[in-house]
Amino acid sequence: EPEVTQTPSHQVTQMGQEVILHCVPISNHLYFYWYRQILGQKVEFLVSFYNNEISEKSEIFDDQFSVERPDGSNFTLKIRSTKLEDSAMYFCASSATWAAEAFFGQGTRLTVV
Amino acid sequence: GDSVTQMEGPVTLSEEAFLTINCTYTATGYPSLFWYVQYPGEGLQLLLKATKADDKGSNKGFEATYRKETTSFHLEKGSVQVSDSAVYFCALSGRTSGSRLTFGEGTQLTVNP
């Protein structure tokens, strides 16, 4: 069964450092998403990506965040200068069409120290 | 904006007990409604969905009915098993918010033998 793959499963980084989270969406899907879940809080939407550009972003997704689909298979989330409050579980998801079922990866736990 | 409210957790039940997890929503228009489940150490998986009023989504013995008049989508199962222990998330995809998902807080379910 096709699945969304995220790496690494756990990333520890120092405050102020850049971090890149990696995702391989399901191969025939067209819409890609990043969500995050701070411990004990709701899963929050960050950004959606379609046709090689951002289609929606939340207020959380400020200039410190960027996304890229560098090679037609990977979908990355970059945080330029991490803060302590960026510590969270980050989920990548993909869907075949707009508003179709989203398939989620297992998440990357980011810890900023 | 769109929002989802789930019953406070955690919920602890004995095997074969009846389960209800309440979910209510606020949205403009007529959203699609979802229940996602997260088993320990895994990503979010779609459990069931409903796309219009009075639709009933069902999967693995779980059911939820889209109630427009009460803006609710409560999850039910007649007889839970130990293997149902997980975190359950109610979510919506609003007609006016594109393909992004808005999640509830999540409800931790523990089923004891």
Image: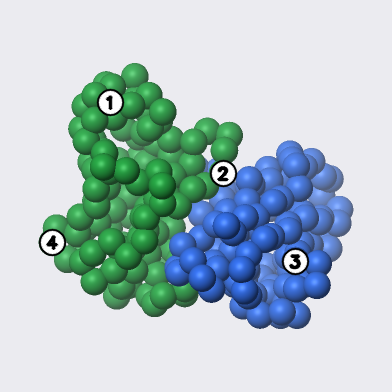
Chain colours: A green, B blue
- Graded by Cα atoms within 10 Å as few (under 14), some (14 to 19) or many (20 or more), the crowding at tag 1 reads some
Q: Are marks 1 and 2 in contact (CB under 8 Å)?
A: no
Q: Name the residue under label 1.
A: A13
Asked whether the viewer can see residue A66, the reply is yes
Instruction: Output the chain of dot 2.
Output: A
Q: Name the residue under label 3.
A: B71
Q: Quadrant of the C terminus of chain A?
A: top left
> Helix, strand, or loop for circle 2?
loop
Q: Could you give the CA–CA distance between mark 1 and mark 2, rounded to whole angstroms?
A: 23 Å
Q: Could you give the CA–CA distance between mark 2 and mark 3, rounded to whole angstroms?
A: 20 Å
Pointer 2 and pointer 4 on the same chain: yes
Q: Could you give the CA–CA distance between mark 4 and mark 3, rounded to whole angstroms?
A: 42 Å
Q: Which of marks 1 and 2 is nearer the N terminus?
A: 1
State the mark number for residue A42: 2
Pointer 1 and pointer 4 on the same chain: yes
Instruction: Output the chain of dot 1.
Output: A
Answer left or right for A5 relative to B44: left
In the rendered image, residue B33, in percent from the top left (x then y), is placed at 62, 68
Three-letter amino acid code at disc 1? Thr
> Helix, strand, or loop for circle 3?
loop
Look at the picture and state if B64 lies above or below B2: below
Three-letter amino acid code at disc 3? Thr
Three-letter amino acid code at disc 2? Lys
State which mark lies toward you, 2 or 4: 2
- In the image, B95 versus B81, the foreground residue is B95
Q: Mark 4 points at which residue?
A: A71
Instruction: Output the chain of dot 4.
Output: A
Answer left or right for B16 relative to B85: right
Three-letter amino acid code at disc 4? Asp
